[in-house]
Amino acid sequence: MKKFRNILTMAIVALFAMSACDKVDEPYLKSDERDNVIHRFTINNVEGLVNSGLKTVILTMEEGVDYTDITNLTPEIEICKYATIEPASGVAQDFSEPKQYTVTAYNGDVAVYTVMVQSSNPDDGKDILEFRFPDIFVTADVDNVEKTVFAGVPRDTDVTNLVPEIRVSEGATINPASGEAQDFSAPVIYTVTAANGSTCEYTVIVDFIIGDLVRKKVLLEDYTGVRCINCPAAAQVALDLQEDYPGRLIVLGVHAGYLAQPVGTFPDFTTDEGDEWYSFFGFDVNPIGTVNRIPYSGNIGVNSGQWGSAVIAELDKDPVVAIKLFNTYNPDTRALNVQVNLRELVDIDDDLSLVVCLMEDNIVGKQVTTSGLVEDYVHRHVFRKSLNGTWGETVAFDAIGITEQYDALIDEAFDASNCYIIAYVYNNSDKSILQVEEAKIME
């Protein structure tokens, strides 16, 4: 009997030890402990537009569809498994007014998101979709929940005579009008009038803090191949990291090396530029990656198991260059114009270059995997070509920044709706990437 009690006591102790196990003992990415991001927010299969920078979620409900009472909608919310959210996912809420959700990371960091549910009735559309100052290469941050527009401008800007370009909802008008010069030394009220006559007022604020508005972004180049058995697992690592850092990690899948060469009916994603990069950096295996082309643990080629740590190290750095992309695409002629606006945020004495790339996402084709040959594998972030050469072109900054223009025709074989422009600025001396930006060619 005594032996039985001892065994029972040991079992109870073990059970409490298991239940008290600290989360830090689990094999999770270091970044997870500070993840306080809403990754997905849906109501009745309608997915919300999550803006982690502005801490907003906007759901547009289809006009004429019965979603029951807007005061009693139940959202499904995805966050990091170590974080908490209040109100909780699956709890009905009243969305007749904007609702605040608080996400608390494992380390205690808090982010408060504002969630707004709106109708897709086109006659009621009265949002500011874009607000920019093309003469000084600045695009403002538009908050369609708080109805504010904030633009950070260079300190030498004459804010008393700025001319904005403004894009609003279809059928709506705005007053003052787009293209009219304004004095932004004090906040300016803009009124947007919908097609049905309803109105909405936005407060536009301009201030001299451009550096604080730019977020550091990182480029992960995944050197992969259609006949590389371990490459799909590495590609999944890249996708998971993008979910961990929404809007801050940009991935470029570069097919190069022996295992990228197509055989038979395998797709050919190889490029001259990719082959040259692969050779220049001395790679001879797949998968292998670069994270801003910065050596990590002494090597510029980083194994996929180290990508997370390398990305964290780069995201911790302050941005030194700002990049804005404006794409204009004609689906009839397949002609693309890319405008790249660049600005230094700090004085940089080194020689810098700009590369502008075309990337196509979600291409279905053969791929070898650990489970065998997959006929309908979905290839992600496929590098298609550079618009300005393998190593781009040197850029020289001046006091107000610079603008570069590029024209290209999108190949008939490419799905334009899945194509993106990726532009990055790098240091010529060591090829390290200072900043990167990405924009879809069709919105």
Image (tube, rainbow, N blue to C red):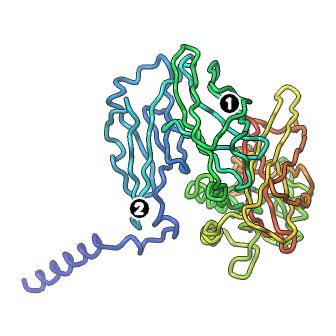
Q: Is residue 340 visible to us here? A: yes
Residue at image mark 1: 167
Query: How many marks overall?
Result: 2
Name which of mark 1 and mark 2 comes first in the sequence. 2
Residue lying furthest top in this view? Answer: 196
- Of residues 56 and 36, the one drawn nearer to the viewer in this rendering: 56
| Residue 75 drawn above or below residue 272 | above
Q: Is residue 435 above or below residue 430?
A: above
| Direction from residue 37 to residue 22 in the image, left or right | left
Q: Is residue 267 left or right of residue 37?
A: right
Q: Quadrant of the N terminus?
A: bottom left
Label 1: how many Cα within 10 Å (few below 14, some 14–19, many 20+):
some
**In this rendering, would 377 be left or right of 5?**
right
Visible in this render: residue 226? no
Question: Element under label 1?
Answer: strand
For residue 238, what is the image quadrant?
Answer: bottom right
Which element carries disc 2, helix, strand or loop? loop
**The C terminus is located in which quarter?**
top right
Q: Tell me the amino acid under the disc marked 2.
A: Tyr
Residue at point 70%, 56% (across, down): 155
Q: Which residue is mark 2?
A: 82
The image quadrant that residue 327 belongs to is top right
Residue name at image x 59 percent, y 39 percent: 204
How far across and down, in percent of the image, does residue 7 sit?
17, 81
List x then y, in percent, for residue 333: 88, 28
169 lies above or below 78: above
Q: Which residue is painted at 83% across and 42% down in the image?
A: 338
What amino acid does circle 1 point to?
Arg
**Where residue 390 sits in the image (x, y, percent)?**
91, 59
Measured as percent of width and height from the top left, residue 18 is found at: 29, 73
